[in-house]
Amino acid sequence: MTGLVAGVTALLVACQFAPQSPSIGITPADKASPIYRKQAAQHLYEKNANRIYKGMLPPMLYAIGVLQVQLDGQGRVRSLNWMRKPSHAPEVVAEIERSVRAAAPFPSAGKSVTYTDTWLWDKSGRFQLDTLTEGQLGQ
């Protein structure tokens, strides 16, 4: 038990002093609210209406990617940062990045914001975002 407490304490101290990434400028104040994340997902759905997978996703997906998007105060894309890149599917990575950039400008939050969403990609080329997913069969 003492080892567990020491480990948790060390982790908390490390997190407290973790450096921010200057390349994308993310600080805790820049994180978008869950409400904004939903607005951004709905915006992407509107811009890609014919590419949204309708209904529950199949149990095996072709690709899953977690993308962090930084927007300026006018909703323009400043940067994209893959938290989990589906490296086995470079065409999906390229298509997601193209889709996000093409959807700009996003709804304005009045300030620079960064939000993260998970892309659930079917082999058909259609997708859902985790924020608005209808679920997955077999779960």
Image (cartoon, rainbow, N blue to C red):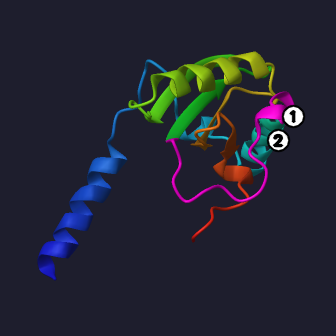
The quarter of the image holding the C terminus is bottom right
Please say if the residues under marks 2 and 1 sit with CB atoms less than 8 Å apart.
Answer: yes
Q: How many residues crowd mark 1 within 10 Å: few (<14), some (14–19), many (20+)?
A: few
* Of residues 65 and 36, the one drawn nearer to the viewer in this rendering: 65
Kindly identify the amino acid type of the residue bearing the numbered disc 1: Glu
Secondary structure type for disc 2? helix
Q: Is residue 132 magenta?
A: no
Give percent across and percent down for residue 135: 67, 62
Q: Nearer the viewer, mark 2 or mark 1?
A: 1
In the rendered image of this protein, does residue 77 appear above or below residue 128? above
Q: How many residues crowd mark 2 within 10 Å: few (<14), some (14–19), many (20+)?
A: some
Name the main secondary structure of what is drawn in magenta.
loop
Give percent across and percent down for residue 29: 60, 39
* Of residues 14 and 63, the one drawn nearer to the viewer in this rendering: 63
Residue furthest to the bottom in view is 1
Residue drawn 51% across and 54% down?
60
Report whether 38 appears left or right of 7: right
Residue drawn 55% across and 34% down?
67
The residue under label 1 is 46
Kindly identify the amino acid type of the residue bearing the numbered disc 2: Gln
* Of residues 134 and 114, the one drawn nearer to the viewer in this rendering: 134
The residue under label 2 is 42
In space, the residues marked 2 and 1 are separated at their CA atoms by: 6 Å
In the rendered image of this protein, does residue 59 appear above or below residue 19? below
What range of the chain is rendered magenta?
46-63
Give percent across and percent down for residue 50: 83, 33
Residue furthest to the left in view is 3
Name the image quarter holding residue 39: top right
**Residue 1: assigned label:** none
Report whether 65 appears left or right of 102: left
